[in-house]
Image: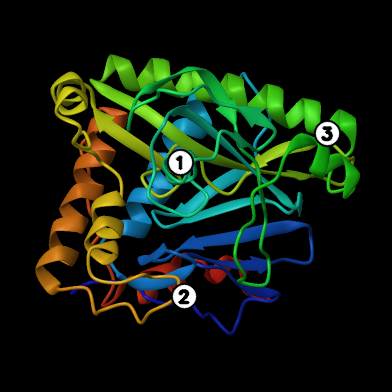
Amino acid sequence: MRILPDAFIPELPGRYKGKVRENYDLADGRRIIISTDRLSAFDVILTSVPFKGQVLTQTARYWFEETADICPNHVLEYPDPNVVIGTRLDILPVEIVVRGYLAGTTGTSVLTKYRNGERDMYGIRLPDGLKDNEKLPQSIITPTSKAFDGGHDEPLSTDEILSQKLLTADQCDTVSHYALALFARGQARAAENGLILVDTKYEFGTDKDGRIVLADEIHTPDSSRYWIADSYEESFAAGTRPKSFDKDFVRAWVTERCDPYKEPIPEIPLALIEQTSKVYIEAFERITGQHFLADLSGETVLDRIRNNLKPYFS
């Protein structure tokens, strides 16, 4: 399969390897961010999915352009379908997760916590009587720690963020304002395309002037949960999960077979990988309203990216 499991380019300086993206820091303050095809869940890499990196980069590009009036973002240019050149930022140590529904499968999701009897979480009190996948009375922010060393993200409240001095009060107010405004825009645009933006995460950083800037990705199938709107009412009434465009069905396949936080994760079947690739492509087309054109130039994806990034070699 034509996949990009790794994007090591020795001619580029300052490499940092994330769960999905490869980052290179240039001497002039720019950062090269390459989206690989790695699929991450439960804080591990499950597999690689054809064209996933291109889908992520191009979906984020759509949303960065659609939300540029709400807050500044890191984007400078796109030299390759899998690559964005951005302003290098000091990433804030908190991920801002916004949720509009009682949903999720991970240990930090509000649904998992709610099922376990928790009502006070992330500094928020949820009412009794909510059902799986029910729309929350209002969108809520559920921050988590940003695990830079590959560790587990941990739930945080605003008071904990401030007491641990992870953010200043002004920074906390700013990222919260930006996140809720971005989420509202995302939900509105998604609804126009027959989708429900259920929840999402945002990463912010500060530039050399201390300005807070949106980084990484926005409203992609990796960072967000989307449901098909016309499937929601029937699924909710039946107590089942609505049809989705996210990677939750892969998570569900895994959790049906093991406890992914304590037990070895089975190898993901090829058929499920192929299905996942189709879902990512379909998600791009449904979210953006654009036709997906897979870039098949170059002998491999990495060869194509290396060729397009030659002007940045030191």
Instruction: Read off the residue under disc 2.
Output: 7
- How many dots with numbers? 3
Comes first in the chain, label 3 or label 1: 1
Relative placement, left or right, of 242 versus 126 is: left
In the displayed image of the protein, which residue is found farthest to the bottom? 10
Label 3 neighbour load within 10 Å: few <14, some 14-19, many 20+ = some
**Quadrant where the C terminus lies?**
bottom right
- Display colour scheme: rainbow
Q: Is residue 173 above or below residue 248?
A: above
Instruction: Read off the residue under disc 1.
Output: 60
Comes first in the chain, label 2 or label 3: 2
Using the rendered image of the protein, determine whether residue 69 is visible from the camera's viewpoint.
yes
Q: Is residue 50 above or below residue 236?
A: below
Residue placed at 66% from the left, 25% from the top? 178
Residue placed at 83% from the left, 34% from the top? 171
In the image, residue 140 lies at what x, y percent? 57, 26
Question: What's the residue type where badge 2 is placed?
Answer: Ala
Q: Could you tell me how far apart the alpha carbons at marks 2 and 3 are, in whole angstroms?
A: 33 Å
Q: Nearer the viewer, residue 241 or 128?
A: 128
SS class of the residue under badge 3?
A: helix
Label 1 neighbour load within 10 Å: few <14, some 14-19, many 20+ = many
Instruction: Read off the residue under disc 3.
Output: 171
Q: Could you tell me how far apart the alpha carbons at marks 1 and 2 are, in whole angstroms?
A: 19 Å
Dot in front, 3 or 1 = 3
Dot in front, 2 or 3 = 3
Residue placed at 38% from the left, 70% from the top? 260
Question: What's the residue type where badge 1 is placed?
Answer: Ala
Q: Are marks 3 and 1 in contact (CB under 8 Å)?
A: no
